[in-house]
Image: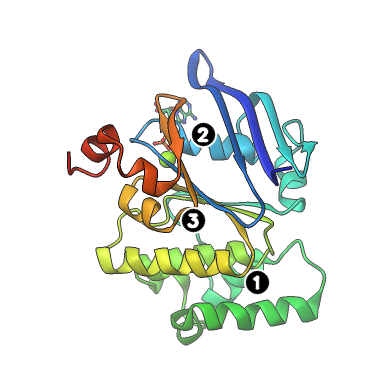
């Protein structure tokens, strides 16, 4: 049984139908990427999973329906959405942002240990832990956003365009970090517009176009597909 499944998911904003029958699954400890052009519905998909956008169809986690649950209940199950645009709290310290990530936990010793783990994973955040979050660079803010999500001990971590707006070297660093998070046993659903990044780290890829899954497969297979080469990799 997959850890996570979406079956025939439809989402509309008012009269605008955005998602039209999405079906996908994520196995435990898999890193699955969703790529697709701007406006395809990638963020809407994550919002529906998080319980923020109202879906038709079913969403299952560990075999149980979660599509009727509140956003808070979904977070409690361990499904954590790291939103697009790194929404950190700018006017408080780095370390306080991380503490907020752990707000739903009560295991003090575990939280302390995870804080250490974050500083190991992101040494730059350790260096900057007492700075206000707004003083961080774009890449550092993205790392903080990811680290804050990890502080809640996610079972499924959903990242929405973590590489957006970052320089190429920083993108690569974020990619490597996501890979090492997967290496620690976290299941990851990664939404990316940077297809090269997605293909380089994902176990499997779904291509979302105009609210539908246009293609899916292993990165190495998709990268041989002439359509993907031309449209997504610019090497057709
Ligand atoms: N809150 C909203 N109300 C109405 N339309 C929206 C809303 N959010 C997104 N949309 C529209 O839904 C479509 C898909 O958006 P989105 O899921 O953000 O795509 P992506 O993340 O793939 O760029 C776009 O056409 C966008 O304008
Ligand atoms: Mg988006």
Extreme residue in the top direction: 15
What colouring method underlies this structural image?
rainbow
Q: Quadrant of the N terminus?
A: top right
Find out if the beta carbon at label 1 lies less than 8 Å from the nearest ligand 2 atom: no
Q: Secondary structure at mark 3?
A: loop
Q: Secondary structure at mark 1?
A: helix
Q: Nearer the viewer, mark 2 or mark 3?
A: 2
The residue located at (54%, 20%) in the rendering is: 12
Find out if the beta carbon at label 2 lies less than 8 Å from the nearest ligand 1 atom: yes
Residue 101 image position (x, y, % from top left)? 64, 64
- 173 to the left or right of 102: left
Depth order, front residue of 140/234: 234
Residue 199 image position (x, y, % from top left)? 38, 51
Q: Which mark is residue 84?
A: none
- Of mark 2 and mark 3, the one earlier in the sequence is 2
- Of mark 1 and mark 2, the one earlier in the sequence is 2
The residue located at (32%, 68%) in the rendering is: 170
Residue 14 image position (x, y, % from top left)? 53, 16
Mark 3, residue position: 87
Quarter occupied by residue 138 = bottom left
Quadrant in which ligand 2 is drawn = top left
Depth order, front residue of 221/68: 221
Q: Is residue 91 visible?
A: no
Residue 209 image position (x, y, % from top left)? 39, 28
Mark-to-mark CA distance, 2 and 3: 17 Å
Q: Nearer the viewer, mark 1 or mark 2?
A: 2
Mark-to-mark CA distance, 1 and 2: 28 Å
Mark 1, residue position: 99
Mark 2, residue position: 44
Placement of 72 over or under 216, stated as above or below:
below
């Amino acid at each position: 049984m997959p850890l996570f499944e979406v079956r025939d998911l439809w989402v509309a904003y008012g009269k605008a139908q955005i998602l039209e029958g999405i079906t996908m699954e994520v196995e435990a400890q898999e890193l699955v990427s969703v790529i697709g052009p701007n406006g395809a519905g990638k963020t809407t998909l994550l919002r529906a999973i998080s319980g923020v956008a109202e879906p038709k169809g079913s969403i299952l986690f560990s075999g149980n329906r979660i599509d009727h649950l509140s956003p808070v209940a979904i977070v409690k199950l361990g499904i954590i959405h790291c939103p697009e645009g790194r929404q950190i709290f700018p006017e408080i310290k780095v370390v306080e942002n991380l503490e907020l990530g752990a707000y739903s936990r009560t295991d003090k010793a575990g939280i302390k240990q995870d804080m250490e783990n974050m500083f190991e994973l992101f040494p730059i955040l350790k260096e900057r832990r007492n700075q206000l979050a707004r003083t961080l660079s774009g890449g550092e803010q993205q790392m903080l956003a990811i680290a804050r999500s990890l502080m809640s001990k996610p079972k499924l971590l959903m990242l929405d365009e973590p590489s957006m707006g970052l320089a190429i070297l920083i993108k690569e660093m974020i990619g490597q970090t996501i890979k090492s998070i997967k290496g620690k046993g976290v299941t990851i659903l990664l939404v990316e517009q940077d297809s090269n990044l997605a293909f380089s780290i994902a176990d499997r890829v779904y291509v979302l176009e105009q609210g539908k899954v246009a293609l899916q497969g292993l990165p190495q297979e998709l990268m041989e597909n002439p359509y993907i080469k031309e449209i997504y990799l610019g090497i057709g």
